[in-house]
Image: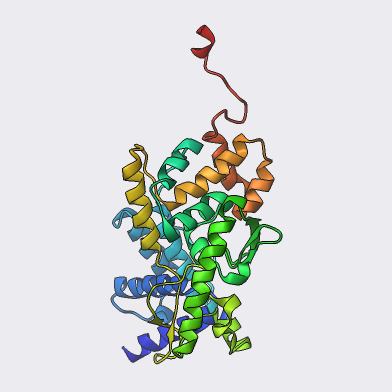
Amino acid sequence: MAQKRKLLDRVREMIRLKNYSYRTEKAYVHWIKRYIFYHQKRHPEEMGRDEVEAFLTHLAVEGNVAASTQNQALSALLFLYNEVLRQPLGQVDVTWAKKPVRLPVVLTREEVGAVMAHLTGEPLLVTQLLYGGGLRLTEGLRLRVQDIDFGQKLLVVRDGKGQKDRTTMLPDAVVPALQAHLQVVKKQHHDDLQRGYGRAPLPNALAKKYPNAETEWQWQFIFPSSTLSKNPRGDADVLYRYHLHESTIQRAVRKAAQQSGIAKRINPHTFRHSFATHLLEAGYDIRTIQELLGHKDVKTTMIYTHVANRGVLGVRSPLDELA
């Protein structure tokens, strides 16, 4: 058992060395544990490609997991063997879960307004940034004070999906409310400092490079949590102010969607989908939209051509020609 704990410690150390997020760390450790237990607690050093293939096939066939879940498990095991154990697996041949091709749920501009009409405070501000800048929910919540450029009307999305930085627009419509919100956050930060707190957790590499930066104003989250909490990666006795939890925005959006009476499956990510679709409908270039969304492959962005109001070819139904 001691050997197993030591292995997981090595996994965590390597993940932090490569500056992966805490969410990735939890997910990778979870899948490595499941892999070990599936093979009756055998040490991964004693196993290899055959055992990995058996586990991944089990997830797809018997576990009935989604393709994305199976891919995450594979990523965790590849990381374990390639980066930690230094025993590359080579080509992994498994039965892959079928990945259903589903079109994203998109709101009309009127529907976006209808949902936002039932939001207030921070949930409204966050949602406006998701729709106005095409952000993922985690990207919006992780924004720090220095990531807003009011002069150039830009948002800097740091360490987005795939560990890439990018810029997107800061909508004019949200600027006054966002500036007023930051004044409240700044006062809270000042009060925290007076009480001996005022720390925001930094990425592991930055925390080592700039040990005093965690109390500086520019590193504070724009949407801070209402409570202080411990850093699972740091000193257990030090309290930090993290950003709002995703569930706070998810609950608010779900309630607002119900109140709006719109019969669509609406969640925070719906606003990112709507951002991309509305830009496409407005005639913006697909490559520009790809960059704003932070998609690695333009094929991912092309999905929005299937839900845009007029489509890429502007096809009109023959039924409408009868009128």
Q: Quadrant of the N terminus?
A: bottom left
Image spot of residue 167 (x, y percent): 66, 59
Residue at 54% x, 30% y is 309
Image spot of residue 37 (x, y percent): 30, 74
Image spot of residue 138 (x, y percent): 48, 63
Image spot of residue 24 (x, y percent): 46, 70
How many discs mark residues in the rendered view?
0
Identify which residue, 234 or 296, lies in the foreground: 234
Query: Along the horizontal axis of the image, is 117 left or right of 314?
Result: left
Query: Along the horizontal axis of the image, is 152 left or right of 112?
Result: right
Query: Measured along the vertical axis of the image, is residue 225 above or below residue 16?
Result: above
Identify which residue, 223 or 93, lies in the foreground: 223
Query: Measured along the vertical axis of the image, is residue 181 above or below residue 255?
Result: below
Query: Along the horizontal axis of the image, is 313 left or right of 253?
Result: right
**Residue lying farthest top?**
322
Query: Along the horizontal axis of the image, is 100 left or right of 16?
Result: left
Residue at 51% x, 8% y is 323
Quarter residue 276 falls in: top right
Q: Is residue 10 visible?
A: no
Q: Is residue 229 visible?
A: yes
Colouring scheme applied when the structure was drawn:
rainbow
**Residue lying farthest right?**
152
Identify which residue, 292 or 196, lies in the foreground: 196
Quarter residue 162 falls in: bottom right
Residue at 39% x, 90% y is 236
Quarter residue 204 falls in: bottom right
